[in-house]
Image (tube, rainbow, N blue to C red):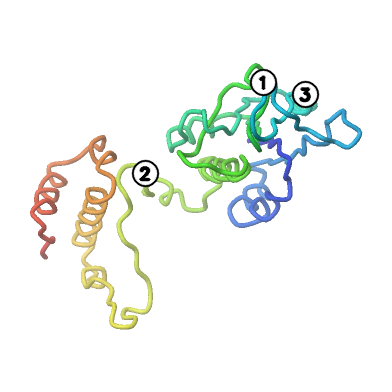
Amino acid sequence: MRIDVLTLFPEMFTGVVNSSILQRAINENHLEINIIDYRKFSLDKNYKVDDYPYGGGAGMVIEVEPIVLALRSIPKGYTVLTSPKGVTYNQDKAKELSKKDHLIIVCGHYEGIDNRITNYIDEEISIGDYILTGGEIAALAMIDSIARLIPNVLGNQESLQSESFEELLEYPQYTRPEEFEGLKVPSVLLSGHHENVRKWRRFQSLKKTYERRQDILEKANLTKEDLKFLDLIKEGKDLEF
């Protein structure tokens, strides 16, 4: 998969792109990431890319021309704009975008971009209902979530199948030492009883999802066992072995 990012701040991507899973995906040729500074496509002698908005108002608006020229310098791909006006990003959208051969992300900034940019993109995407200085952080979040869905990028595909938001919130995880400052690992995880461990993990996933994200729970495919566990959770009871 190829991802091109159009931004005014390419340095914001250096550390993330050259680290961890993304770096490995690039090194193993599963992913290509190109960071393009669209300031370089400005026709202004000082490479200025913003101007005052027509009709007045606070702040500056990014000009459409440098971005379009930058887009025309690369092959066509599915183009998205990070924008608070866009559709809300979620795991389903990440899956959809991960299937694209070539994705282009345009990072907005300041008070926005000349609205004519919408004639040159395929979709506007927002990562949440809060204000960011620019679209770079949004782009990084999208790249990370998309990359891990590309086949062979994750070393352990089971991790991808069982992680949060695929169904329920993930159960608690523990590692050594068995006790730390009086805090002990749940005894069931030390028992070696695989079926009890499975039940405990499922119960904990259901409990956490019930307490924090009932919207996910409402859409989940629940088994008869799940429903029994939920009855215990609603009654404030724990699973006993």
User: Residue 157: horizontal and vertical position, in percent?
Assistant: 45, 48
Q: Can residue 2 be seen in this view?
A: no
Mark 1, secondary structure of its residue = loop
Residue at 36% from the left image edge and 42% from the top image edge:
166
Residue 76 left/right relative to 122: right
Task: Single out the residue that lies furthest toward the right.
Answer: 45
Residue situated in front as seen by the camera: 178 or 215? 215
Mark 3 or mark 2, which is nearer to you?
3
Q: Name the residue carrying label 3.
A: 65
Look at label 2 and name its amino acid: Phe
- N-terminal label among 3 and 2: 3
Residue extending farthest bottom: 181
Q: Earlier in the sequence, mark 2 or mark 1?
A: 1
Q: Distance between the residues labelled 2 and 1?
A: 44 Å
Give the quadrant of the N terminus.
top right
**Residue 29 in picture, x, y percent from top left:** 67, 44
- Give the residue number, with chain letter if any, for mark 2: 165
